[in-house]
Amino acid sequence: MKPVQRRPVHVPAKAPTGVTGLDEITGGGLPRGRTTLLVGGPGSGKTILALQFLVHGARACKKPGIFVAFEESAKRIVANFESFGWNLAELQPKKLFFVDARPSSELIQSGNFDLGGMLAALEAQTKRMGAQRIVFDALDIMLALLPDAAAKRREVYRLHEWLLAHELTALITAKAGGDEASSISQEAFGFMQFMVDCAVVLNHSVVLGVSQRNLRVAKYRGSAFDENESPFVIGKNGFDVAVSRVLGRVDANVTNERVSSGVPRLDTMLGGGYYRGASVLITGFPGTAKTTLSGAFAEAACRRGERTMFVSFDSDGTEVIRNLASVGIRLDHYKKSGRLKMISARTIIGSAETLLVRIKSLAKEHGARCLVIDPVSNLSKAGNELTAHGVAERLIDWTKAENITLVCTSLLDETAGQTDGGTPLQISTLADTWIHLNYLVQAGERNRGISIIKSRGTAHSNQVRELILSDAGVTLADIYTAGGEVLMGTLRWEKESAERVANEVAEVAGELKRVSLDAEEAVLEVRAKSLQTELVAKQVEKKLLVRTAESRKGELSRGRTHIRELRRADAAVAGRK
Amino acid sequence: MKRRIVYKFRLYVAGEAQNSAQAVANLKALCLGYLADRHEIEIVDVYREPTRALEDGIMMTPTLIKLAPTPVSRIIGTLAQMQPVLLALRLEAVVA
């Protein structure tokens, strides 16, 4: 039996759209040589997306394109899109050609008609410029002129056949009500949705007064795609689709480099500081010095010479600088030199998505390596509760990919109590390092405590420290535990001084004891010396005594002999005696 | 005596398509009925002259353009419904 040969899987060729995010969702772009349907409500950004697709094709891919406008005149479109900086005039007419296909207002209709004329005209133009991409903007307007559903179907079918025969990558936009269901109920488009190879739905809704835009790829024949709704914004340069984690994304560069937190003892607690590219979360109640701690980080970053961006949702940039200067964190000259960029986002109203895009583009512009967002919990302001979590996730994802060290603070709800609970955005699970600040009210004082709840990949202290703010800067102090109670502030100071006094007393007592021992030793030494002398005297005396006794004995015998000699006594007589 | 007005028409058709063929037939019948001996018809096949269709902005076929007398007017479709066509060409007055 012959082994079954596995054929290489045929991946349909893609035509990149140049839209950030959309190419990632679709795995490379729209199906090349096929038709894509773009459905959306009024003002959902259909024309922008369609034109961006052509501009990118003409400029980056060297694929000329035709824009068939059924709704607006070519002149108006060019004027409207001037603000995106695409420079349409430069591309026209060789690389980008506009066909004005608006039905004129005084058009009189009698009986049936078809799109043969348009296709013939387009064919001529396609050949002339070698077009490979084509957009039909607001095809629904043309179809509305056709008398019945059968005719509409027929013309859509004719168009589709023509596109396939000419291997054009086509994008057809069509209006739909705000919700997706109504677009499907429209018979002609319902039919079209089945016919095309790819369908993209744009959604524009207002949630609690905040505009939310979403893009969703509804179908894509022969290709995998991200099926979820992805938020997008229409920014300065066109579309920007937010992509939540896409599989197969290149992992961020992970380094072992540490960056200082700006507080030396905190660095020690963290085993050397934050990791470069890590995301750090500082949580705490209002007034627990979250901003101060993040300011210290910013100052340290500037001192290292790294470009830093500080986004404040609470107060003005200058206010932040002034307030931080009161605790010895001086940022003003870094701001003046341009190394530090202060962004006040207090007044920016908009969806969390818009904010993220703004922050991203500003950070890119500034070339920031360190980023502070104070507080990140502001993303979930009214109207953004649903999307804020995803935005926070993407924020962390993005900083990691760019190797930007992120410090964000998060306000905890005062009513939630003094628990080490999660943050409103659940960002605590995503952050690499989580520092918690809280108050300890004790003996009529409110003192700040700092603890590290988690720090991935670093050994870290398990101790709660006291955070002390003074005009000399931010310092950490050890806290005392006495009888199971944590002592801070004055109590800690008292405990410290009491300990100091006790130490001194002990030291003095020791000295005293040593001196008295010295004295005793001296006395004993003296006694030992006199005894020694006495001993020597006694020995001399004893020697003398022995010598005297011997000499007397010798004297006696010598005297007897001498007497005998004097008496001339006979030795024999003497012997008889 | 009233001056004889010559009607000049240009009809854009898409080859032998059914709609186009109908339009040609309808236009000819109309001219015979109302404008005998005072009309000129030019038929443009967009498949043969696509650039002309592009330049003239012809999107739908068939399209009839009345070039003279002024004002110029455009009618799309097979011309199957006579009434709006006559109205547009201001031929009702002639009939009456």
Image (tube, coloured by chain):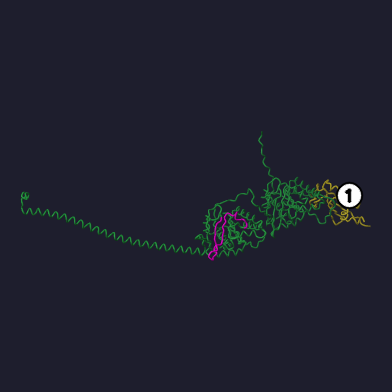
Chain colours: A green, B yellow
Name the kind of residue labelled 1 in the image. Lys
**Residue at 24%, 57% in the rendered image:** A536
Residue A554: which quarter of the image? bottom left
Residue A8 appears in the rendering: yes
On whether residue A327 falls in the magenta region, the answer is no
Q: Chain of mark 1?
A: B
The single residue placed furthest to the top in the displayed view is A1
Tell me the SS state at disc 1. Answer: helix
Quarter of the N terminus of chain A within the rendering: top right
The residue lying toward the viewer, choosing from A512 and A387, is A512
The single residue placed furthest to the front in the displayed view is A577
**The magenta segment:** A424-453
The single residue placed furthest to the right in the displayed view is B1
The residue lying toward the viewer, choosing from A216 and A109, is A216
The residue lying toward the viewer, choosing from A564 and A93, is A564
Locate residue A389, reporting x and y percent: 64, 55
Residue on which disc 1 sits: B28
Residue A137 appears in the rendering: no
Locate residue A166, reporting x and y percent: 75, 46
Q: Is residue A391 left or right of residue B16?
A: left
Q: Is residue A22 left or right of residue A295?
A: right
Magenta stretch: dominant SS? strand
Q: Is residue A141 left or right of residue A360?
A: right
Q: Residues within 10 Å of mark 1 (few under 14, many from 20)?
A: some
Q: How many marks?
A: 1
Residue A71: which quarter of the image? bottom right
The single residue placed furthest to the bottom in the displayed view is A444
Q: Is residue B30 left or right of residue A469?
A: right
On whether residue A447 falls in the magenta region, the answer is yes
Locate residue A251, reporting x and y percent: 60, 49
Locate residue A488, reporting x and y percent: 52, 62
